[in-house]
């Protein structure tokens, strides 16, 4: 089993190498991040204590354009994880053909233990720490786990204060009022839903009433669940870090969304302590059962959508998985050892670099609007998202079928590696 996400990413690259038309020397070059900055972040908390946090920004590859990638606030952040995520961003932007490279940032912290003011100070200090390496034409951060439009607003403000004028284009995923784009908040979940629909079309299966389990009910998971529910699928289970809710007849996704938006946990929802205006009494749905995150992963459903953290589908649980398709909303949810078993069992896995690319596609559209100083309506953004992720899906399927590749991940990786390698070959080696 590969526990280290960076080793997992390298193993995914190695699996694709034999099928990719990439010079071995260039391939070796692609295994190393361009640079990683580690920053020490002393912050005076609202309690009066000074806590010293640690943060990273990894810039993995810029052959195809400026670096692009989110910032994660989480206790389990490590340098290796940030580097793996930056690598995955590189393959993702290449696969969906955006003029970007890949990057990622992270701060080791538990946001639940910090006040709003603590989070603002930490974000500003982190932005100051990495500000010499970011910029609208250099490296453009965005939200990821536990960061959101407010975090991006603080990053944009901090960067702009140093520059002496407003620079909205330095981050994406901003609030609408300061240069954000309509559709960004739900973009990753919308992409997951669109890709699931395309997969069902490809497999010639009906999505209506297909059963879906979504691990993680945050930004990505909740929007994917809502949009799949609207598309007619039956979302039977979802979870957060506190536990999972399961109802074989389907969950009330809207009520769950209201509960979580109001700050509630899934375990409270299952226990009947429902926030956000919905109550068990006025719900037309049955009370769901409490199950664990581990049990959610092994439910007998048509589609499993991991939308929380990496490394959840491993050699240890893959034999218990019963879903007939997996759509990877989270980054790196499947280890290579598990992948090999899924390929043997013919379980279709839509890889993360395709399934969750909706977020970076709409981030790109936000960046373009900022550069043009011209904003687009939601319909234009959503249509462009659908066109771009649909094209990437079709190209992946074409590669998979035409080359007789073992699985969709290998197809997506060969495309991404070939595009990135071609950019390197054209640019040549400096000096
Ligand atoms: P989020 O913080 O909004 O939500 C994460 C969810 O996962 C929460 O419900 C949380 O309780 C749950 N969770 C956390 N740790 C867990 C654990 N150990 N077991 C079970 N559940 C757990 O984060 P998000 O932005 O929705 O990101 C989720 C995943 O999607 C991450 O892998 C992220 O890298 C990836 N992703 C996010 C975006 C984006 O635009 N936000 C884009 C591409 C990929």
Image: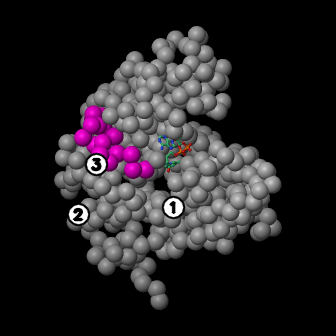
Residue that label 1 marks: 78
Badge 3 or badge 2: first in the primary sequence: 2
Q: Nearer the viewer, residue 185 or 72?
A: 72
Disc 3 marks which residue? 315
- Viewer-nearest of labels 1 and 2? 1
Q: Which image quadrant is residue 264 in? A: top right
Up the image or down, 185 lies above or below 26; here it is above
The residue sitting at 52% across, 54% down in the picture is 76
Q: Mark 2 — residue?
A: 19
Mark on residue 378?
Answer: none
Q: Secondary structure at mark 3?
A: loop
Q: Nearer the viewer, mark 3 or mark 2?
A: 3
Badge 1 residue CB within 8 Å of ligand 1: no
Report, in whole angstroms, how far the alpha carbon at label 1 lies from the one at label 2.
Answer: 31 Å
Is 313 inside the magenta-drawn segment? Answer: yes
Confirm whether residue 36 shows in the render. Answer: yes
Dot 1: element: loop
Q: In the displayed structure, does residue 275 sit left or right of residue 293?
A: right
Horizontal arrangement in the rendering, residue 73 relative to residue 397 (left or right): right
- State whether residue 202 appears in this view: no
Q: Residue at x 21, y 54 (%)?
A: 405
Percent of width and height locating residue 288: 46, 20
């Amino acid at each position: 089993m590969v526990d280290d996400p960076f080793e997992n990413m390298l193993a995914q690259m190695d699996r694709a190498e034999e099928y990719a038309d990439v010079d071995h020397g260039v391939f070796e070059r692609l295994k190393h991040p361009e640079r990683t900055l580690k920053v020490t972040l002393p912050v005076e908390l609202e309690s009066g204590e000074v806590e010293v946090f640690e943060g990273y920004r990894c810039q993995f590859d810029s052959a195809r354009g400026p670096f692009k990638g989110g910032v994660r606030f989480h206790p389990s952040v490590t340098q290796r994880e940030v580097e793996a995520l930056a690598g995955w961003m590189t393959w993702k932007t290449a696969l969906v053909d955006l003029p970007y490279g890949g990057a990622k940032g992270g701060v080791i912290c538990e946001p639940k233990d910090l006040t709003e003011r603590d989070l603002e100070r930490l974000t500003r200090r982190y932005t100051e720490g990495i500000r010499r390496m970011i910029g609208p034409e250099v490296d453009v951060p965005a939200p990821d786990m536990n960061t959101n439009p407010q975090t991006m607003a603080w990053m944009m403000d901090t960067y702009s204060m140093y520059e002496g004028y407003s620079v909205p284009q330095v981050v994406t995923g901003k609030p609408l009022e300061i240069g954000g784009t309509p559709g960004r908040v739900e973009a990753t979940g919308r992409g997951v839903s669109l890709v699931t629909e395309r997969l069902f079309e490809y497999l010639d299966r009906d999505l209506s009433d297909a059963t879906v389990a979504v691990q993680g009910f945050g930004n990505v998971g909740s929007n994917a669940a809502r949009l799949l529910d609207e598309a007619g699928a039956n979302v039977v289970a979802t979870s957060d870090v506190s536990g999972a809710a399961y109802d074989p007849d389907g969950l009330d996704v809207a009520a769950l969304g209201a509960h979580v938006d109001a700050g509630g946990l899934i375990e409270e929802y299952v226990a009947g302590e429902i926030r956000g205006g919905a109550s068990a009494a006025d719900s037309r749905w049955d009370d769901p059962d409490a199950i664990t995150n581990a049990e959610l992963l092994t439910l007998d459903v048509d589609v499993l959508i991991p939308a929380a953290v990496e490394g959840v589908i491993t050699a240890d649980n893959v034999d218990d998985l019963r879903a007939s398709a997996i759509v990877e909303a989270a980054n790196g949810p499947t280890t290579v050892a598990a992948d090999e078993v899924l390929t043997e069992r013919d379980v279709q896995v839509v890889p993360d670099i395709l399934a969750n690319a909706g977020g970076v596609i709409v981030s790109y559209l936000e960046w373009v609007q900022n550069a043009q100083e011209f904003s687009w309506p939601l319909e234009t953004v959503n249509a462009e998202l659908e066109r771009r992720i649909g094209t990437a899906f079709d190209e992946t399927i074409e590669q998979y079928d035409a080359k007789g590749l073992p699985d969709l991940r290998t197809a997506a990786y060969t495309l991404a590696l070939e595009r990135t390698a071609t950019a390197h070959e054209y640019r040549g080696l400096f000096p």
